């Protein structure tokens, strides 16, 4: 019997790749081939499914047990391409230091054989925000110690590509205050673009991408590695658990507290880190406008206000 016989693609993943969704026609082709790839990967590593498959927006994760030694692991599948290749590169370089460990990778199926973590316990479960942020900042500090390898997509390329999209995004924004803010973010990027940095960035390290483990209490998952300045990696942490931040009496002050703690943990120059965080807000805005929005994301506006009025 094929090992994938009982593997069902989660409805959420199928919906992501439906008509007009994630990855277009190529994404739908990948999804259609996924059961076969799961079967191949199970055979490649002589593994048995050990629970229900789960998914994010674009990937499938299957808990498995390796038959030859009983190791509990997970298989992760995501569409081939630059993002998947970068994830493998980053995980290999980190080698479990602050991040989930990559046991192996099968280029034929695109599958990653990963260390099993506790997917039911993210950093969101830590009630005290300063404790949670300290954990995340400690992981981030370890990850960005690693220099990025040659050939990895770089922040320099990202920063160089953004200005050409700013005029159209500015025209699409309905509010004059949003348009002024967008221009200020673009100016911040222009000041820093000549020195984009060379560290290995996670690019998406928020509370939900930190899972409890056995080897270490907490480890980062789901990297989207990029070569660049660590300041560009702060926004996901600043935006984490935003509903709680928004409920504060002074959300901007709460953002500044997070920013100060993170920049202390990573020993970053605060002006430079603030500038690259504004660059991250610019990137977010360009994406949301491209998706049809006509206003800046409220949380990004608060974060911007906090950083532009730090003194």
Image (cartoon, rainbow, N blue to C red):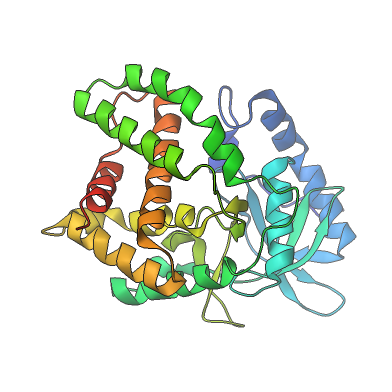
* Residue 67 appears left or right of 266: right
Residue 2: tell me if it is visible: no
In the drawing, does residue 117 fall left or right of residue 253?
right
Is residue 297 depicted above or below 309 in this figure?
above
Q: Quadrant of residue 101?
A: bottom right
Q: Residue 194's quadrant in the figure?
A: top right
In this rendered view, identify the residue nearer to me: 28 or 157: 157
Residue at left 75%, top 48%? 151
Answer above or below: position of 81 versus 66: above
Q: Residue at x 72, y 52 (%)?
A: 6
Res. 185 in view: yes
Q: Where does residue 163 sit, x and y in percent of width and height?
A: 47, 28
Q: Is residue 281 left or right of residue 111?
A: left
Q: x%, y% of residue 61?
A: 65, 56
User: Residue 303 in the image: x percent, y percent?
Assistant: 28, 49
Q: Residue furthest left?
A: 249
Image quadrant holding the C terminus, namely: bottom left
- The count of marks equals 0
x, y (%) of residue 161?
Answer: 55, 31
x 36%, y 61%: residue: 270
Tell me what residue is drawn at x 51 percent, y 54 percent: 204
């Amino acid at each position: 019997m094929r090992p994938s016989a009982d593997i069902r693609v989660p409805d959420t993943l199928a919906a992501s790749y439906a008509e007009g969704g994630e990855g277009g026609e190529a994404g739908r082709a990948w999804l259609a081939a996924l059961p076969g790839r799961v079967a191949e990967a199970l055979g490649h590593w002589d593994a048995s499914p050990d629970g229900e498959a789960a998914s994010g927006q674009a990937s499938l994760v299957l808990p498995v047990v390796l038959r030859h030694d009983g190791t509990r692991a997970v298989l992760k599948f995501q569409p081939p391409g630059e993002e998947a290749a970068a994830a493998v590169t980053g995980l290999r370089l980190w080698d479990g230091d602050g991040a989930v460990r990559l046991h192996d990778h099968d280029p034929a199926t695109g599958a990653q054989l990963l260390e099993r973590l506790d997917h039911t316990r993210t950093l969101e479960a830590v009630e005290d925000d300063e404790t949670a942020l300290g954990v995340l900042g400690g992981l981030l500090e370890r990850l960005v110690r690693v220099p990025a390898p040659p050939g990895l997509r770089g922040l320099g390329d990202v920063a160089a590509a953004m200005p050409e999209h700013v005029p159209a995004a500015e025209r699409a924004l309905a509010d004059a205050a949003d348009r002024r803010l967008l221009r200020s973010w673009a100016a911040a990027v222009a000041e820093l673009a000549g020195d984009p940095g060379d560290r290995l960035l996670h690019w998406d390290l928020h509370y939900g991408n930190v899972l409890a483990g056995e080897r270490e209490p907490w480890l980062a998952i789901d990297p989207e590695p990029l070569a660049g300045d660590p300041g560009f990696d702060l926004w996901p942490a600043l935006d984490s658990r935003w509903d709680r931040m928004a409920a504060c009496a002074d959300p901007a002050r709460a953002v500044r507290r997070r920013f100060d703690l993170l920049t202390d943990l990573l020993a970053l120059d605060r002006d430079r880190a603030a500038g690259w965080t504004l660059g991250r807000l610019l990137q977010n805005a360009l994406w949301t406008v491209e998706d049809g929005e006509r206003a800046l994301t409220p949380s990004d506006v608060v974060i911007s206000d906090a950083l532009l009025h730090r003194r």
